[in-house]
């Protein structure tokens, strides 16, 4: 009898709690943030999550365009100084006022988080923050710095009052997790859930007021499991729907899918710095001069890629063919460049012209757990190259091993592979990000070409990129970046773009998500009827 | 008829008295055949990128593509024929299982017999190590090796050898202890044969029966463990897919209804492990008359 | 006696030391955690800062020395990813794993003991043969594959039970566990059954062997001759006598259930320690890998030590042999 009573009580309480949750949202996330501290780990899931709790001076909308969030306006007042006017009347979650002191404190703190595995120093160092009055600041740099709003956009503002002396653990426990964002932090159980509640006093700029009373984030790493949870109504909304499930889910009337192209291009790096490349041989295994040094061979490879088949078959239609480093619409892209056509005959001819008419053998290296369908992309490429006489083997490995070897697994910490599949998401939302990292000559001292794993090097490209980075005028800078892309990708084939990744979100049918190009999952972009 | 042959025939008769075990043994022989001759019996070479086409990905069982290839068990996400993938997978799974079993048998019986033979501090040291090792669950031992040293075919084999050797050592020692007191060992000692010769030419052959029983059951266990590790992404690399990896790869297609990619390799694994287990179980009963 | 315990204790410490050397040394050879952690847009200066921050610029021997010194103070290092003490992360996940293991132990005993008794009581019946054959099948079925099948049948096709994660948490007598809510139970059922599968097979065999032995004992014959019903004989005499050894053995093997839960947790996305270690291996979170392995090795080594010592108290022969060493 007692047992039955007990069960009854449990049943009732379950029912009641489900009624109370009617206006709540449960989100199934692929990757949970590694911390609630917004400056601890500069990585996608953390930055996306932190947007719920914390504001930034410059906001970034679904197309990574700027909008005023905690700053109402910003402009360069001379070559080396930017002025930011701060929004008045904004309150932190604990009721304290937001002022210039908080910004100055944030700028200091964000560069100096102990044990941080990836910090914000890249965006903040060399910038001097000066308080003019309680709601005006100046940021000074040594050289002209046009990308100021892009850098400032990445840094979440914390409260000085709550943040002084606070450690990352204090943020994780909620003690210091005080921001100006649309939601307040309630609880985090790593691996299990994060709970937020609405901030009724949200200042209302950007994406607007919070739409749900409570949000529960559940990390569900496996794609199939996320879908199952959505179908079972365990969650209302999931991110990163695997492409292979999209077709079937589209037929399901209880689910609403939203796909959007991202700022991430999937591309190929080719060894252009070794006469004798380690993973390339003549047919049969003999020594051969590295064919990838010849631009005709690189062009031939691009022409041999059937990008339509890649998009429709490998990516299940959930991707966009790429002809440059960022999709149209972003700042600094070229409006001249189109994806290369599929033309195996022309490719064969180019190979023959370059003296490789008999083909050669090479190994394509790629990750198998980093990008959408990455291992399949590598395999499909090998199939396509075999059609123009290049015998390609495929070796894929987990990202844990891959990136180290791809960056510096060879002798003297040089890149180990000859031909590799990679991806690049432009976090800054404009073309200088991929250009300086992937195509500028590798130069540690000036922080250029950090991810240039093929070591492409062209002084013309370098000059264009550097000139662009010092050009404050936005249009002029955009032109320079587009020109750099046209030379580096269009003429030199320094890298070969394949496609832009698309991301798909799925929600119950009464909701709709506005896809973000930066791949972030932010609850305020979900609209429910 | 030589006595050896007669003994063998008697053994065969004994073994066949259990029909289940006999059938299991025949199935195992068939699997072994398929595994060894996978390149010859497979309809296609699943890892030759010139023949595999991405256009054929995820075809259900019993379909034919435009060029007339017939896929009895369907294709996987990369367009590979499942039958061929399973045959090649069997080859890897059995290869890793048997290879690690043989190494473990050699290492284990060496330490087991020498421990029994020399006794004293050496014996207590070896047996202490064996005891400690056996107190750990097999998956934990494998996990330690693979977590610490990374994945790869040779590391998986090392992990599986480490998991198994202690069982062989224990069995070898206890049978060797019985054998050592027999007359033929004394006789060999009188003839001043070297220790190595006595241990491995005289004692070892007489310990083989229980070692073979342990060997069969351990091999089944090793195959199963390798599949588990590969499924977890810690075992074999993706370039050499064993059955475990095939199942793991199919897992992501499960929710979209493409069940065959995961189910069929699993059935193959189950049949393999179960047939070895049944044979081993029966062998154990035969060599352990106490149970009857 | 004291000498024996001391020797065994020293051996345990030695095992732990060798393990720490092996695990720490090995983990530090694999991959590059910085490449995994850092934002691709970070410049070289930032990369170098992170390498310093994580202590990866020091020689491995020095890192190991710090690890040992701190381990003695109860600090097993901080997670590269979460920045929090590895020990804390593991302890946070421990309840989920324990509740899964306990529940699956419960399921396996409930299912296996009746089947085992039946198979031992009527060894030649058809049903018994089926039971024993299934137990071999149970040994042969790879746990993770059965888990996948479970998900496909019960979660995807029938939609009866959830396939992933842990359910709501309830509180009962001050203990927080998802076993105390209906939602929680529905979540734990499939993974627990999956984890129990192997155990069920072994307990069936154990019970069957025990039952067969007891059935032949004099006191059973005596009870029968006194006219006690067969039902009573099985329920009272057999059950009572086999339960103790079975529970002892199964209890001692509880550790292996925790070790094998790694697999089940991965299939069902159960947020326990096992999933943490697999995730950490993927993400090269070295401190967590080392801490987890050291904690679980310590657990097993000391469990073993305690069992050894208990045996010497219970069985003097072991003690004599031990003193000989």
Image (cartoon, coloured by chain):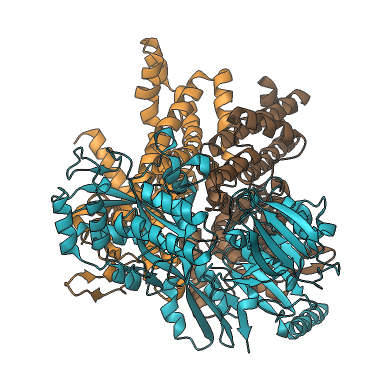
Chain colours: A cyan, B orange, C brown
The outermost residue toward the front is A78
Task: Indicate the position of residue B145 as horizontal and vertical percent values.
Answer: 52, 40
Residue A180, quarter of the rendered image: bottom right
Q: Residue at x 37, y 50 (%)?
A: A460
- The relative height of residue A57 versus residue B8 in the rendered view (above or below) is below
C44 sits left or right of A102 in the view = left
Task: Indicate the position of residue B221 as horizontal and vertical percent values.
Answer: 45, 49
Q: Residue at x 17, y 53 (%)?
A: A351
Task: Indicate the position of residue C222 as horizontal and vertical percent values.
Answer: 68, 57
- The relative height of residue A54 versus residue A393 in the rendered view (above or below) is below
Q: Nearer the viewer, residue A127 or C114?
A: A127
B56 sits left or right of A151 in the view = left
The answer to whether residue C93 of the structure is visible from this angle is no
Q: Which of A346 and A116 is in front in this view?
A: A346
Q: Quadrant of the C terminus of chain C?
A: top right
Q: Nearer the viewer, residue A59 or C195?
A: A59
The answer to whether residue C33 of the structure is visible from this angle is yes
A356 sits left or right of A303 in the view = left
Residue C181, quarter of the rendered image: bottom right
Task: Indicate the position of residue C302 as horizontal and vertical percent values.
Answer: 70, 38
Q: Nearer the viewer, residue B35 or C266?
A: C266
Q: Residue at x 37, y 9 (%)?
A: B192
- The relative height of residue A220 versus residue B8 in the rendered view (above or below) is below
């Amino acid at each position: 009898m007692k047992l039955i009573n007990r069960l009854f009580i449990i049943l009732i309480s379950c029912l009641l709690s489900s009624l109370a949750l009617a206006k709540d949202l449960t989100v199934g996330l692929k990757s949970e943030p590694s911390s609630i501290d917004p400056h601890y780990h500069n990585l996608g899931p953390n930055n996306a999550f932190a947007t719920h709790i914390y504001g930034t001076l410059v906001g970034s909308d679904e197309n990574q365009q700027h909008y005023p969030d905690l700053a109402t306006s910003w402009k360069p007042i001379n070559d080396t100084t930017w002025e930011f006017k701060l929004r008045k009347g904004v309150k932190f979650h604990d009721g304290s006022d937001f002022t210039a002191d908080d910004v100055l404190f944030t700028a200091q703190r964000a560069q100096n988080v102990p044990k941080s595995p990836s910090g914000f120093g890249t965006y903040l160092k060399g910038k001097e923050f000066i308080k003019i009055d309680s709601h005006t600041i100046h940021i000074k740099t040594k050289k002209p710095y046009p990308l100021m709003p892009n850098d400032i956009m990445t840094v979440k503002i914390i409260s000085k009052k709550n943040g002084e002396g606070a450690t990352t653990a204090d943020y994780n426990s909620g003690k210091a997790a005080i921001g100006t964002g649309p939601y307040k932090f309630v609880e985090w159980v790593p691996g299990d859930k994060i709970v937020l509640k609405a901030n009724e006093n949200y200042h209302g700029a950007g994406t607007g007021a919070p739409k749900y009373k409570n949000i529960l984030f559940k990390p569900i790493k496996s794609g199939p499991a996320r879908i199952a949870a959505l179908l079972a109504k365990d969650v209302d909304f999931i991110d990163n729907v695997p492409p292979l499930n999209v077709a079937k889910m589209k037929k399901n009337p209880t689910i609403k899918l939203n796909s959007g192209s991202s700022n991430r291009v999937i591309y190929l790096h080719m060894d252009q710095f070794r006469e004798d490349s380690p993973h390339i041989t003549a047919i049969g295994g003999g020594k051969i001069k590295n064919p990838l040094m010849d631009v005709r061979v690189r062009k031939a490879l691009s022409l041999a890629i059937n990008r339509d088949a890649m998009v429709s078959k490998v990516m299940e239609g959930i991707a966009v063919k790429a002809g440059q480093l960022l999709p149209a619409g972003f700042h600094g892209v070229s409006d001249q460049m189109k994806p290369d056509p599929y033309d195996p005959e022309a490719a064969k001819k180019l190979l023959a012209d370059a003296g490789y008419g008999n083909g050669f053998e090479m190994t394509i290296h790629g990750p198998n757990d980093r990008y959408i369908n990455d291992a399949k992309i590598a395999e499909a490429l090998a199939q396509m190259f075999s059609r123009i006489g290049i015998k390609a083997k495929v070796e894929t490995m987990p990202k844990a091993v891959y990136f180290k070897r791809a960056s510096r697994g060879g002798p003297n910490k040089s890149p180990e592979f000859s031909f590799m599949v990679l991806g690049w998401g432009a976090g800054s939302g404009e073309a200088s990000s991929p250009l300086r990292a992937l195509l500028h000559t590798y130069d540690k001292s000036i922080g250029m070409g950090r991810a240039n794993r093929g070591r492409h090097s062209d002084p013309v490209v370098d000059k264009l990129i550097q000139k662009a980075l010092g050009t404050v005028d936005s249009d002029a800078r955009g032109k320079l970046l587009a020109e750099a892309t046209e030379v580096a990708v269009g003429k030199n084939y320094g890298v070969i773009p394949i496609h832009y990744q698309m991301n798909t979100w799925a929600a119950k049918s009464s909701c709709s998500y506005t896809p973000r190009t930066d791949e972030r999952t932010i609850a305020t972009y979900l609209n429910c009827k | 008829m030589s006595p050896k042959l007669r003994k063998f025939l008697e053994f065969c008769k004994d073994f066949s008295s259990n029909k289940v075990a006999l059938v299991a043994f025949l199935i195992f022989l068939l699997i072994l055949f398929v595994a060894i001759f996978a390149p010859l019996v497979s309809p296609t070479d699943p890892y030759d990128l010139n023949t595999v086409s991405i256009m054929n990905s995820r075809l259900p069982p019993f379909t034919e593509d435009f060029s007339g290839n017939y896929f009895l068990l369907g294709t996987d996400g990369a367009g590979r024929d499942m039958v061929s993938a399973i045959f090649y997978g069997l080859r890897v799974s059995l290869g890793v299982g048997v290879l690690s079993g043989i190494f473990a048998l050699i290492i284990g019986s060496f330490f087991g017999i020498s421990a029994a033979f020399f006794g004293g501090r050496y014996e207590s040291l070896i047996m202490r190590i064996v005891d400690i090792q056996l107190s750990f669950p097999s998956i934990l031992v494998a996990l330690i090796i693979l977590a610490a040293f990374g994945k790869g075919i040779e590391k998986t084999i090392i992990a599986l050898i480490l998991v198994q050797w202690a069982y062989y050592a224990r069995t070898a020692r206890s049978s060797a202890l019985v054998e050592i007191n027999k007359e033929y060992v004394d006789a060999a000692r009188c003839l001043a044969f070297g220790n190595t010769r006595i241990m491995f030419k005289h004692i070892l052959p007489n310990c083989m029966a229980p070692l073979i029983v342990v060997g069969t059951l351990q091999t089944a266990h090793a195959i199963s463990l390798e599949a588990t590790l590969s499924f977890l992404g810690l075992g074999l690399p993706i370039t050499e897919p064993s059955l475990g990896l095939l199942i793991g790869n199919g897992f992501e297609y499960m929710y979209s209804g493409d069940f065959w990619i995961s189910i069929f390799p699993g059935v193959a694994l189950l049949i393999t492990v179960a047939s070895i287990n049944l044979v081993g179980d029966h062998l154990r009963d035969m060599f352990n008359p106490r149970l009857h | 006696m004291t000498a024996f315990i001391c020797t065994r204790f020293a051996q345990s410490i030695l095992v732990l030391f060798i393990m720490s050397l092996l695990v720490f040394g090995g983990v530090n050879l694999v991959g590059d955690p910085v490449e995994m952690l850092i934002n691709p847009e970070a410049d070289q200066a930032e990369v170098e800062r992170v390498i310093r921050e994580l202590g990866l610029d020091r020689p491995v021997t020095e890192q190991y020395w710090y690890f040992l010194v701190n381990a003695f103070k109860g600090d097993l290092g901080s997670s590269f990813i979460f920045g929090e003490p590895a020990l804390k992360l593991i302890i946070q996940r421990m309840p989920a794993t324990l509740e899964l293991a306990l529940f699956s132990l419960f399921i396996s005993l409930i299912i296996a003991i009746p089947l085992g008794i039946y198979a031992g009581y009527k060894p030649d019946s058809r049903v018994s043969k089926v039971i024993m054959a299934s137990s071999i099948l149970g040994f042969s079925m790879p746990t993770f594959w059965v888990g996948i099948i479970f998900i496909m049948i019960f979660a995807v096709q029938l939609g009866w039970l959830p396939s992933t994660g842990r359910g709501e948490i309830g509180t009962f007598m001050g203990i927080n566990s998802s076993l105390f809510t209906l939602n929680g139970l529905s979540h734990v059922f499939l993974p627990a059954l999956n984890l129990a599968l192997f155990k069920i097979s072994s307990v069936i065999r154990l019970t069957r062997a025990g039952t067969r032995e007891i059935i032949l004992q004099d006191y059973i014959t005596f009870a029968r001759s006194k006219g006690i019903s067969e039902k009573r004989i099985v329920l009272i005499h057999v059950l009572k006598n086999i339960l103790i050894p079975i529970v002892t053995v199964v209890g001692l093997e509880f550790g292996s259930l925790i070790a094998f839960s790694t697999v089940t947790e991965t299939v069902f996305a159960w947020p326990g320690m096992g999933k943490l270690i697999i995730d950490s291996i993927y993400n090269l979170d070295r401190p967590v890998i080392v801490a987890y392995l050291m904690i679980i090795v310590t657990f097993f080594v000391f469990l073993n030590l305690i069992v050894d010592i208990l045996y010497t108290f219970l069985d003097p022969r072991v003690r004599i042999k031990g003193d000989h060493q």
